Amino acid sequence: MTAETVTIPKEEYLKLKKCEEVEKDLLVSLVKGLEDIKHGRIIPWKKAK
């Protein structure tokens, strides 16, 4: 399989890179949250009145 080359505007490239960083940050946060739940490090939510 050969790689293809595409040309996009710099602004679009920077926007895609930023989205990639945000996605990585969200994934790391999700994994840490799930590990906290697994190890019982959670605080129960108070019910809204």
Image: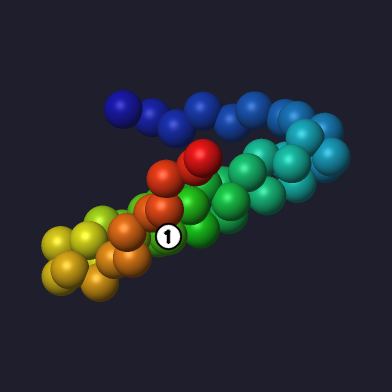
Horizontal placement of 46 versus 10: left or right?
left
Corner quadrant of residue 40: bottom left
Give the x, y percent position of residue 15.
74, 41
Q: Residue at x 51, y 40 (%)?
A: 49
Q: Residue at x 58, y 54 (%)?
A: 21
Quadrant where the N terminus is found in the figure: top left
Corner quadrant of residue 33: bottom left
Of 39 and 1, the residue lying toward us: 39
Q: How is the image coloured?
A: rainbow
Horizontal placement of 48 versus 12: left or right?
left
Disc 1 residue type (three-letter): Ser
Q: Considering only vertical position in the picture, is 23 above or below 6?
A: below
Give the x, y percent position of residue 23.
51, 47
Horizontal placement of 37 versus 29: left or right?
left
Q: Residue at x 32, y 59 (%)?
A: 44
From the image, tell me which residue sits under label 1: 29
Give the x, y percent position of residue 2.
38, 30
Of 8 and 12, the residue lying toward us: 12
Q: Residue 32: tell me if it is visible.
A: no
Corner quadrant of residue 31: bottom left
Q: Residues within 10 Å of mark 1 (few under 14, many from 20)?
A: few
Give the x, y percent position of residue 36.
26, 67
Q: Residue 49: tell me if it is visible.
A: yes
Secondary element type, mark 1: helix
Total marks in image: 1
